[in-house]
Image (spheres, rainbow, N blue to C red):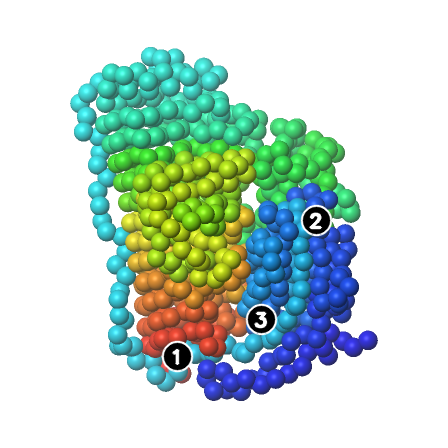
Amino acid sequence: MRSVRSLIGVIVITCLSGMTVAISAPVAGSFADNRVFEINPSLVQRASDGQSVTVDTTAQDRTWRYLVRTRAGVLQKGKNYQVTFRYRIATPDGFFHILCRPLGGAGDALRANAGYSTEFKTVQFKFNSGDSELPPSFQIHALEKMRGELTDFKLVETGADRYFPVGGKNTVPWQGKLGKLPTGARDFTVALPKNTSGVTVKAADFGFSPDNPDNVPALNQALAHCKKIGAARLELSPGTYRMRFHDSLMFNEMRDFTFDGGGATLVYYGDGRATGVNLAHCERVVVRKVNFDWDWEHDPLASIVRVVRVKPDFTDFEFVDYKRFPRRDLRVAFVTSYDPKTRSFGVADGIDGRFEFSAGENRPKTEWRSDNVLRVWGQSQLFRVGQFFRMQHRYYDGSCIQMNGNRHLTLEDINIYSCSGNGLIVDGRQQYWQLRGVRVAPPKDALRRVISSTADPYHVIRSCGFCKVENCAFAFAPDDCINAHDGSGIVGKSGPMAVISRNRFSPSMVASFRPGDILELRNLNFSPTGFKAPLKAIREIDGAKGIYELQFDQPIPEPAVPGDDFVLFNRAFNTGNMIIRNCDFYDCYNHAILVQGSDFTIENNRFRKMGTGGIDIITGYFAKLWCEGYGVDNVLVRNNTFDMVNPRNNKNYGRARDIYIGIFQDEERTGYHILSNILFEGNTFINSFGVVAVISSAENVIFRNNTFKNPNPTYPVTERAGFFLTHDSQNVKIVNNRWLASPYVPSPGIYATPDSVTGLAVGGNRVVSAESGTANKEE
């Protein structure tokens, strides 16, 4: 039998630089070719046509499984590829999950989705195979119960990237025209309460006491009394107070009011999904000097475990910080790789295991084998004896503080030591609010406290903008520290003047619509359709499935591509004009900040030992998972320090990166520049694992006067501490930056894919002596 490599021919093309390079012709095979693809026989059948495979996962549980994957040797390490294939899906909830992933390892070089389509649809993906020592593999997975078909697979190896080295003889400062310079957010003031000399109420007068087993009712009575009499202030006495995680503390339509916690600590306990504090439709309200925590003595939110035994059907986990784990009916929600030496989640190509991620869904069988060893059935192929993980016992299970529709709200001097679910959530038509000295992080020296919030510390679902985050800290979080966006949706034309939701509209999204809101329809590549009109009405079709019809008084256009759907923006919302200043982000699993709005200033912050990246500037949709953002414009990122912010080696386009600027979509990147006018200046990047930034589908991006230091070894990546530009990036300028000389970055530079980057300006970049900070004499 011929080898896989012998199936690939060679043709010749010419790159942007004029260099002639070899590129591989299509693989002479198909999804049904056993020499190229391994198939999952329990889910996939080869069709009689010799080109196709049929997929049926309807008899399986709702969990990720591979369908097809290329065998070792089909893809080569560090190469650029393009794959094209056609697919169709017969079941509305189904989608194909497209990956390039090392066989037997982690670290995806490609991750995208192909959504529901009853007719055959052609998709194309360009990607780099990555730098893992394990063989790279193009793979297609499924999660939902679905039936579908895959056919007409083609693979080509595309040209080498264009390379612009840093330094050399010409290191004089670049003095070209920068064009439009982003200015970031406009400054603004959040108004404080006007009523500063009114009545002060003591919570203790309503039974709020350290001896009370549940202080929520007493505190709610005190708040209701304050609202009734128009009190200026409610004061708590110092101490520790028990709070049942069931009913919220209700701040509803309060005006000119201060809640002074006096340094009190509110310790929550109990099961279920709840919200600790609910601030709704308040104006000029301050919440200050209060601590929030969880009952770790009886119910830890997460634990460090070590794998002590692995068998085909189960894995035994030892709880290393406990002789006897206190909760015997614990939930195994999620596990992620952990480094016990550094007490961090920065394990390169770390492993994640998703068990009962959502409470009550796919609960694995478990059994205590001793006081601190738990046997868990399922997914044992992920684990090896001796590995360490953080095991979460909750994830999206409520929140600590939820804010909805407030104006001129201030949270200051608040510690969220730990909580179930998100730390802080913003939703609705909230405008003008600030976080000052808010800390979502465990107490210092509390070694068992390996998590703060069990989901995002700070999540803006939608708002009307104008937010300040100053002198805050976010640590030991399992998800993105700050995720600020507005919720978009995928809709299809259902009548002359109506559209119907294609993705599942959540209750909060449905509640966000009001008749008269200006709604905009975009094509799936985010280009405008020209349709902006007031919403006439919303009609429920199937509330359990999140299907709703939106009705207008104006005719709906046809999409640019016949048969496509639309992306829906509600222009009543604009999560923009956000200032993030003087904050600390450290020891977290995921990104520090996701910017998915316009007019942002991010300055003088410290990013240390993040898991998967410093800042992502993004917009996109996975129609069956989430849809976020209305585009990005006018972002200023200056004078920040990024120190080892992607030790998990998280990749886009096959490159680990500190910063990612790009689109996420179901199928392919867009040539429409919905991301524009972004400036990084005066920042310091230390110990990058891969490139400093991956930039794609963006316009007018400027990196100037930044410094790159790499004194420590990481992965031996050729492109380390460089830049990678791809897919319709336009007018990018990387100028007047300096690299401190390092033996671990022998060839710093800028890389760009052929025929997809225009208007690139590179100049004035130099390598300087690490000791003196002056230009290297050898250059």
**Quarter of the view holding residue 225:** top left
Pinpoint residue 40: horizontal percent, then vertical percent.
74, 56
Q: Secondary structure at mark 1?
A: loop
Mark-to-mark CA distance, 1 and 3: 32 Å
Q: Quadrant of residue 728?
A: bottom left
- Answer with left or right where residue 523 lies relative to residue 336: left
| Residue 708 vs residue 477, the one in the foreground | 477
**Looking at the image, is mark 1 or mark 3 earlier in the sequence?**
3
Q: Please, what is the three-letter code of the amino acid marked with disc 3?
A: Gln
What amino acid does circle 2 point to? Answer: Thr
Q: Is residue 648 above or below residue 76?
A: above
Q: Position of residue 517 (x, y in %)?
A: 33, 42
Image quadrant where one finds the N terminus: bottom right
Asked whether, in this view, residue 374 is left or right of residue 593, the answer is: right
Question: What residue did someone put label 3 on?
Answer: 82
Farthest residue to the front: give it: 496
From the viewer's perspective, is the residue at label 2 or at label 3 nearer?
Answer: 2
Q: Which residue bears the numbered disc 1?
A: 167
- The residue to which callout 2 is attached is 57
Q: Earlier in the sequence, mark 2 or mark 3?
A: 2
Q: For the point 57% across and 64% down, which residue is it?
A: 123
Picture residue at 73% right of the left edge, 79% below the top: 6
